[in-house]
Every structure is written in structure tokens, then in C-alpha cells.
Image (tube, grey):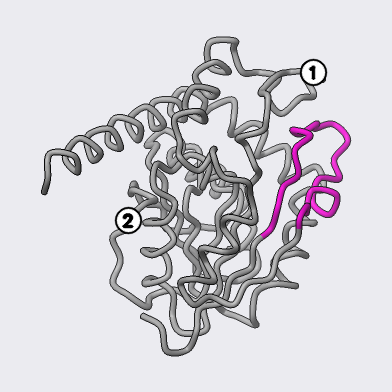
């Protein structure tokens, strides 16, 4: 490894540790928001979207950046075999508690989203939400996720062009960041600004790169009107895009 590569790897490690600390600190309050989503109508809308975009199951699904387990719970309730991974141990504790409330038991594992430690071709589907903006090397993540998918498997990535977003609490307690301190909002902004992906316009950049890997890609510019129906929660104004990328039958 060259000195430059060693320096880059060290910088990536520091960023990942910073992200892990950030989500550890936010875990309890973040989990409360996700529980609200589960009971307030948003959960049912996400399940409808999964039924639309995923093939008939049962499927083996990897939820990368599972956080408090929101996607993992919804998919397990639909009969899928779900594994959820996250860098934050505290988030995984919340995910296990939340899953128990719904009588489902996805497997949760502490693992790096950039390079999940599974054999190739293990999953029918990979799902992520609001994750890729926090990754130091999204290209490497997409390559590794592609290897984990079976031929014909699908990646569902929901995220925003956070590079153009100002984090705030304009709607008070109803705001998705309403319980986030000024210090943590500043930390969130600094993490965002340190990520290379923030310099790209999305989802155009993601679509082009995924196609270069051989995925067949469709997308929606903004799924928020479909899934954010609970008027007691107010989300960031920037669109929430949905990318649906199908792995080719002959690609490793």
C-alpha cells in the first residue's frame, strides 16, 4: 500500500469512527422517531412500496445501515428472511428492542456498510435508507454490494442529495431533527461536508455509476409523497430519491 493510500485509508477510518459515534449518540431519540413511523402510517406505505419493487418471496434481504430496524421490521412482517447490519452498537440494541415489540426477529449484526462480511451471492435484495450519504467511498460500497447479490438480485437505495441540504429544525418538535441538539446538527453537517459523495449531484451520479457496473437501473426522483403520510412528522425538504438497480444474470 502506498503512503497516499495509507493516508486515505486512515482518513476513511477516522470518518467512519466519527459517523459511528454520531449515530450512537442519536440512537435513542432516532429510535423513537422510527417507532412513530411504524405506527403512524408511514410504515404501511413503505410496505406497499416493497411489494411493488421486490420480487415475490420469501426473499433473503440485507438491510444495510438498519439503524433502529425500521426496514428490517417491515420486511420481516412481510415474511422475508432479513439480516440488518449497522456500525452503531447502540442502534442495533434499539433495533432488537423494536423488533421484539412487533414479534419479529431479524438477525442484527454489527458490521461495516462499506464491505459487509458475507460470501458472494447470498442475498435476493439489499435495501438502504439515508445511508449512502454517510459513506466515505460509495463506489466501493456499490461494488461490494453487487457481489453480495444473487444474479438478478435487486438493490433498493433511498437517499437524498444531502450535499445541497441545510440541516435545521424549522418545524419544531414535529421536525425529523426536532430532538437533535445544535451540537449534533453541526456534527452532522461536518460529516456530510467531509464525504466525497456530497460533491456529486444525486441521484444522477449513482445511476451512472451503477449502470457502469452492469446494473439495470430505474429510479424515482422523489418517493417522499408516497411514503411520508404521517402529518405529525416533518422531513427535510430535499427530495428522497429511490433507486432500483437489478444485477445482471452474469455479473459477479
Magenta-drawn stretch, dominant element (helix, strand or loop): loop
Chain-order first, disc 1 or disc 2: 2
Where's residue 111, x and y in %?
33, 49
Which residue is at a point 60% across and 71% down the rendered structure image?
79
Which residue lies at the image location 80% right of the left edge and 42% below the top edge?
40
- Can you say whether 171 is above or below 17 in the image? above
In terms of secondary structure, where does tag 1 sit?
Answer: loop
Magenta part of the chain: 221-242
Residue 115: mark in rendering: 2
Q: Residues within 10 Å of mark 1 (few under 14, many from 20)?
A: some
> Residue 21 has which mark?
none
What x and y, as percent, mark residue 207? 60, 63
Q: Nearer the viewer, residue 203 or 56?
A: 203
Task: Provide residue 77's location: percent of width, then percent of height.
Answer: 64, 63
**Residue for point 58% across, 18% down:** 185
Q: Are marks 1 and 2 in contact (CB under 8 Å)?
A: no
User: In the image, 229: left or right of 26?
Assistant: right
Where is residue 168? Give x, y as percent: 70, 19
Is 65 part of what is drawn in magenta? no
Label 2 residue SS: loop
Q: Quadrant of residue 199?
A: top right
Q: Quadrant of the C terminus?
A: bottom left
Q: In the figure, 51 relative to 99: above or below?
A: below
Q: Is residue 11 left or right of residue 135?
A: left
Amino acid at each position: 500500500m502506498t503512503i497516499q493510500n495509507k493516508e486515505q485509508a486512515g482518513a476513511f477510518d477516522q470518518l467512519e469512527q466519527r459517523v459511528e459515534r454520531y449515530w450512537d449518540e442519536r440512537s435513542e431519540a432516532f429510535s423513537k422517531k422510527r417507532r412513530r413511523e411504524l405506527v403512524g402510517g408511514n410504515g404501511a406505505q413503505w410496505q406497499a412500496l416493497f411489494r411493488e419493487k421486490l420480487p415475490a418471496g420469501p426473499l433473503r434481504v440485507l438491510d444495510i445501515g438498519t439503524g433502529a430496524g425500521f426496514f428490517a421490521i417491515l420486511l420481516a412482517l412481510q415474511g422475508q428472511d432479513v439480516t440488518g447490519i449497522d456500525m452503531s452498537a447502540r442502534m442495533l440494541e434499539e433495533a432488537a428492542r423494536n423488533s421484539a415489540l412487533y414479534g419479529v426477529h431479524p438477525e442484527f449484526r454489527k458490521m461495516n456498510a462499506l464491505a459487509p462480511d458475507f460470501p458472494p451471492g447470498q442475498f435476493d435484495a439489499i435495501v438502504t435508507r439515508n445511508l449512502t450519504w454517510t459513506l466515505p467511498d460509495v463506489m466501493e460500497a456499490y461494488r461490494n454490494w453487487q457481489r453480495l447479490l444473487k444474479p438478478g438480485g435487486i438493490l433498493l437505495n433511498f437517499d437524498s442529495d444531502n450535499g445541497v441540504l441545510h440541516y435545521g429544525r424549522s418545524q419544531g418538535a414535529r421536525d425529523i431533527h426536532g430532538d437533535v441538539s445544535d451540537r449534533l446538527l453541526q456534527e452532522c453537517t461536518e460529516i456530510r461536508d467531509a464525504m466525497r459523495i456530497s460533491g456529486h449531484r444525486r441521484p444522477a451520479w449513482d445511476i451512472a455509476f451503477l449502470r457502469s457496473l452492469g446494473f439495470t437501473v430505474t429510479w424515482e426522483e422523489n418517493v417522499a409523497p408516497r411514503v411520508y403520510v404521517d402529518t405529525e412528522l416533518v422531513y427535510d425538504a430535499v427530495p428522497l430519491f429511490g433507486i432500483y438497480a437489478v444485477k445482471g444474470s452474469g455479473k459477479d
